[in-house]
Image (spheres, grey):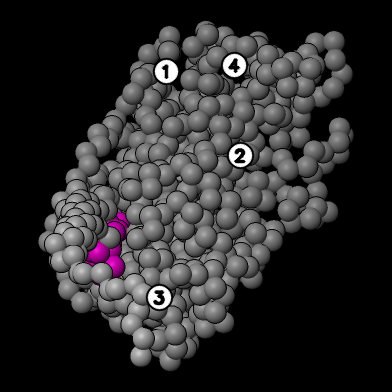
Amino acid sequence: MPKSKHPTPIKNQQLEQKIFRHRIFFAVAVVAFFFMVLMARYGYLQLQQHEHFQTESDNNRIRLQALPPARGFIYDRNGILLADNYPVFSAVISRADIEDVDATIRRLTPVLSLSPEDIEQFGKRAKTARKTEVLTLKLNLTETDIAKFSELKQEFPGVRIETQMTRYYPHGDLFAHVIGYVGRINDRELKSIDKELYAGTNLIGKIGVEKSYEDLLHGLPGHESVEADAHSNVLRHLGRTEATRGNDLYLSLDYGLQMVAAEQMLDKRGAIVAMDPNTGEILALVSSPSFNPNLFVTGISHTDYRALSDNPDQPLYNRAVQGVYPPGSTIKPMAAMGGLHYKIIDWNTRISDPGYFHLPGDSHRFRDWRKSGHGVVDITKSIAISCDTFFYILAYQMGINRMHDWMTQFGFGAKTGIDLPSENSGLYPSPEWKMRTRGKAWSRGETISVSIGQGAFTASPLQLAMATAITANYGQHVKPHVLRETKGEKVLEIHNGTNGKINFSGTREDWEKMHHAMEAVIQSGTGRGIKSYNYSIAGKTGTAQVVSIAQGKSYNEAALKERQRDHGLFVGFAPADDPKIAVAVVWENGKHGGSAAQLARPLMDYWLLKREKEPIIPANVHINAGLMTAGIKPGELPTDSTQENTNTVVAQSAGTSNATQPIPRTITAH
């Protein structure tokens, strides 16, 4: 083989070693650089971002759960439980454990029989809730709901069944219009409430005491840290801040008196209000017909709600506070005191009643209820027999402006300020009111109608009770209220007693004489059917027209439909010489005041004669709310260590829901 023309060069080992070293140094430098970058990043994550990633890690297993506070109990003045807390099963969702909440809810709908309202309420709460917050999807699950979910539980990670406390009213319809009820927080309320304060809470006071004293009853929420697995099952409890339960409320209402009042109004439409004329405490407040408030707590069905809202008797309407009626002759004692104040009449003033009155220059006759008249009458007799003509003449001489200034001092035409929502102010008309609202001048004939509690004059049963209490109390004002005492973390000052006085130019003796005139109503006048030999009663009957009667025509009850008949009214207090109770009764279409007076007498008998010796107390309470209990009967509820509960009467047995029937109650006298 021939030799190559180009000889192989000699290897330069030194150069190769130099190049090799440079490459090593470069490689090491690159590795060192990226190692330093990696270490820097590692240090940044470990040191600077430690808390952030620690939180992210904990969120995968540690949850902060809101602990809703227990709602305060509500009792009557004797410690009888009127509003209780009751455990039910509820379906809750942990949104942090669910990627597609909407899809999960769609799959849950047939399993838990979710209603559109359930889904809507959940969606509204989810918009403002924290991502880690556990939200209630459905309250008060049925046995069927629980059974279906238990079979498919593994298909719904992040969804579980818990026991939650809900409200229960053991006496059902008896106190419905006073206590009211709680219900699910709606969209309007969600915008106004403190989200942190109501974390984990689904219910809020809607009407009655539950609404008026929501701030006291609600309490303060707590929170708990728990470790959970991927299915939201709690593995460990890591820390807990207890919730502060709401205040307990003790009302001025008396269970026994409320029961007596409700029995008088059974199958009737109307209202009864009884109060202590010395303190303003409401002793009983009944609006009839009533309703079962338990139906509203976890969401009333459309069928039940329609049965109530479409009922022509309007059971949801609080007639005692919201209803206004022509007061009729019940206001005559107050009107007569106005005549004495302005010195238009005195106790010796007499008129001759021919059975009618007409204004000078006007042939229209304003008739007395007694067509033949009452002969010669003075103040006392005009009150006792309810002579209309006497008050027609007094009104003509007094004039509407002085009548308005005087009668509004008794609270007519203004809200009493009772601690219940939605109070109606009624109306005591005036020339200014008519011009402002109707654009017309006042007529003299309207003054005559107003003088006997007719025309545009309207008042609520509560206002009539307050005006009667003021009369019984010699002109001293009292403010009606239902809260007597509260116990708990929050402090509230409650005013008992008088808060002002009628501007009266006469003397205490004038008030005493008026009391005697009202006693004559019961002894020999229009209210004589309720005379008592055990104590003295001062009262005044009233009849208010529902339909007008043409001039020259007579009232023919038989020709009128039942709802067109006159309303019967009565106001009174007892004992007359030392008043302990004032009562106002309005019986819609009750025909006349004497009928209404019959309803008032049993209340006075119970309060003055039987309450201490034979008190009416609950003997057995039937659960009528359709609740699926969480394995704890009301009688077995744990007693809070801070709860003074020695006189509590609680439910003992279960029943079924009925929207149109009153809750059955059993009473015993001891």
**What separation in Å lies between label 3 and label 2 (alpha carbons)?**
50 Å
Which comes before the other along the chain, label 1 or label 3? 3
Secondary element under disc 3, as helix, strand or loop, is: strand
Q: Name the residue under label 1.
A: 502
- The reply, left or right, for residue 619 in relation to residue 522 is left
- The reply, left or right, for residue 356 in relation to residue 202 is right
Q: Which residue is drawn at 49% across and 11% down?
A: 341
- The reply, left or right, for residue 40 in relation to residue 254 is left
Residue 403 circle label = 4
The quadrant in which residue 60 appears is bottom left
Residue 159 circle label = 3
Give the residues drawn in magenta, as a range: 57-71
Q: Is-magenta flag for residue 487?
A: no
Q: Name the residue under label 2.
A: 324
Which comes before the other along the chain, label 2 or label 1? 2
Which quadrant is the N terminus positioned in?
Answer: bottom left
Q: Nearer the viewer, mark 2 or mark 4?
A: 2
Give the amino acid at mark 4: Met
> Taking the image as drawn, is residue 183 in sight?
no
Residue 84 in picture, x, y percent from top left: 32, 63
> Taking the image as drawn, is residue 118 in sight?
yes
**What separation in Å lies between label 4 and label 3 (alpha carbons)?**
67 Å
* Mark 1 crowdedness (10 Å alpha carbons): few <14, some 14-19, many ≥20: some
Q: Which of marks 3 and 2 is in front?
A: 3
Which comes before the other along the chain, label 4 or label 3? 3
* Mark 4 crowdedness (10 Å alpha carbons): few <14, some 14-19, many ≥20: many
Which comes before the other along the chain, label 3 or label 2? 3
